[in-house]
Image: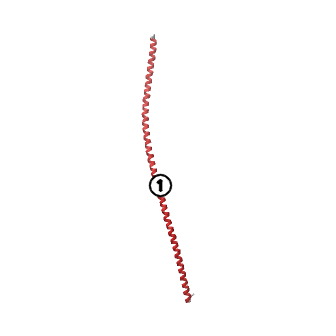
Amino acid sequence: MPTADDFETRLTTVEREVARLRDQATVTSSDVTAARADAAAVRVLAAGADHDVSEIRAERRAHTQALNALRETQLDQGREMRDGFAKQDRRIDTLERRIDGLEHEMRQGFATLATGMAQITALLTNLGASEGLE
């Protein structure tokens, strides 16, 4: 049968254990409070990061749209330039043909003029010879 001393020893041990558990509960309680505060801070940071990521995605979409629009403009300008160059090439070809035709007409005209001048010279020479002007 347990004695009063055993009972006192056991009671003291239980009281010490209860005090230790109270201290541990206080520490655990403050740890839980700190953990709750940390979790709230993490939620705020996560919400801010989500907002920042959303803004970056929106900016990236806007940049992509601007680059695509610029690409389309460059493609359009490239087509316009090629069409313009082709038109100028056709115009130059037409002008070259006209110049060639005019050059041919000019040579024919000078040849006709030279023939006429030769005939005039011959007539004047014959006229001068018949009048004794030589």
Q: Amino acid at mark 1?
A: Leu
**Helix, strand or loop at disc 1?**
helix
Q: Residue at x 45, y 15 (%)?
A: 10
- Residue closest to the far right: 134
- Image location (x, y in percent) of residue 132: 56, 89
1 or 104, which is in the foreground?
Answer: 104
**Colour scheme:** secondary structure
- Image location (x, y in percent) of residue 97: 51, 68
Quarter of the rendering occupied by the N terminus: top left
The correct choice, above or below, for 18 with respect to 85 in the image is above
The correct choice, above or below, for 25 with respect to 40 in the image is above
Q: Residue at x 54, y 77 (%)?
A: 111
Q: Residue at x 44, y 17 (%)?
A: 14
What residue does disc 1 label?
75
- Image location (x, y in percent) of residue 74: 47, 54
118 or 41, which is in the foreground?
Answer: 118
Quarter of the rendering occupied by the C terminus: bottom right
9 or 63, which is in the foreground?
Answer: 63
Q: Residue at x 43, y 40 (%)?
A: 50
The correct choice, above or below, for 43 with respect to 67 in the image is above
How packed mark 1 is, by other alpha carbons closer than 10 Å (few <14, some 14-19, many 20 or more), is few
